[in-house]
Amino acid sequence: MSWRAAVLTLFPEMFPGPLGLSLAGRALERGDWSLQTHNLRDHGLGRHRAVDDTPFGGGAGLVMRPDVVDAALSQALPPGDRRAVIYLTPRGRRLTQADAGRYAEGEGVVLLCGRYEGIDERVLDARGIEQVSIGDYVLSGGEPAALVLLDSVVRLLPGVMGSERSGLEESFADGLLEYPHYTKPADWQGRAAPEMLLSGNHAAIAAWRRAAAEADTRARRPDLWEQYASRTRFSALPITAAHRN
Ligand code: 6GU
C-alpha cells in the first residue's frame, strides 16, 4: 500500500495543483503516493450547507463548526486508519524537515484546511488533532500550507527523488543551511566561481562547502546557528565532562 494523503477543504479544486506537476506529479501518476480530497461543504448544515458561524465572545470573522468538521473527518477516516491528522494553522507548531521525514515514514496524512478565522477548538481537542504552521505569517487559508507540507514529504518517499539528490547533504539535514552552488561559465560577467570548486580536490571541496554552509547559517539564521554551535561545543567536550549533570 503506497503513501496516502487526504485533504479536507472547502476548495478541493486547489489540489493537486502544483503537486500534479514535476517530481511530485510523476510520483502521483506512478502511484508512489495518492491524494484524495473531501469537500467540507458536503457536510454543511441546512439549505445553505453552512459550515461556519459567528465566534462566541464576539470579534471579527467566522469560525468553522465542530459538528461539520467532525462529520467530514468521520467520512474521511475509516475506523482503524492510523494516519496522523493535521490541522494547518498559524497557531500550530512550526513544520520542520524532521517532521517531513517522520510523516514520510508513516502510512500517510490527513490534512484539515480551515478558512475564515479558524476551526472550533473542541473538535481539535476531542480528536487529538496535531496543529501545524508553515511559518510566522498569515495565509488566507490552510490550502497553500497543505501543499507545502505535502511537497516536503512526497519528495522524501522511496523512489520519488530518484538519483537527483541523496537528501542527506541538503539544507537542514544536519542543522545547517546548504552550501551555495555554482556552474558554468567559470567566469560570468567578471564574477569568478570559487576557485576551489574547480580544483578537483574532493576533500578540499568538501571542507570549503562545510565552511560556506557554516558562514551562511551564522549570518542568515542565527537561531539555527546557535543550536548547531551548542551541539558542536557539547559533543567536543570530553565524555566525562559532557555527561556531568
Ligand atoms: Cl498552516 N495556515 C494558515 N492559514 N496560515 C498560515 C499557516 C497555516 N502557516 C503559516 N501561516
Image (cartoon, rainbow, N blue to C red):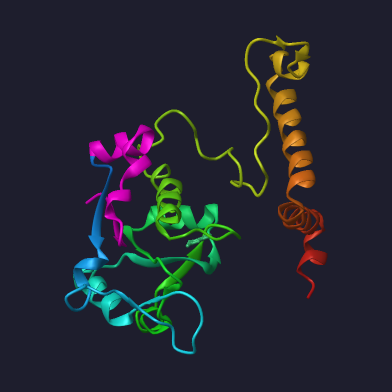
Between 146 and 102, the one lying in front of the other is 146
Residue drawn where x is 65% and y is 10% of the image? 185
Q: Residue furthest left?
A: 47
Residue drawn where x is 53% and y is 57% of the image? 134
Classify residue 177 by image quadrant.
top right
Q: Residue furthest bottom?
A: 57
Expressed as whole percent of the image width and height from the top left, the position of residue 206 reads: 70, 29
Give the left or right position of residue 20, taking residue 143 as reference: left
Considering the image in quadrants, where does the C terminus appear? bottom right
Residue drawn where x is 24% and y is 62% of the image? 39
Residue 21: say if magenta.
yes
Residue drawn where x is 61% and y is 42% of the image? 171
Between 202 and 92, the one lying in front of the other is 92
From what the image shows, is residue 107 above or below residue 19? below
Expressed as whole percent of the image width and height from the top left, the position of residue 93 reads: 55, 67
Expressed as whole percent of the image width and height from the top left, the position of residue 98 reads: 53, 55
User: Is residue 10 among what the camera can see?
Assistant: yes
Give the left or right position of residue 118, taking residue 176 as reference: left
User: Is residue 76 among what the camera can see?
Assistant: no
Magenta residues span 1-30
Classify residue 73 by image quadrant.
bottom left
From what the image shows, is residue 118 above or below residue 213? below
Residue 2: say if magenta.
yes
Please state the total of marks drawn on the protein image. 0
Give the left or right position of residue 243, taking residue 18 as reference: right
Give the left or right position of residue 231, taking residue 166 as reference: right
Expressed as whole percent of the image width and height from the top left, the position of residue 115 reads: 40, 65
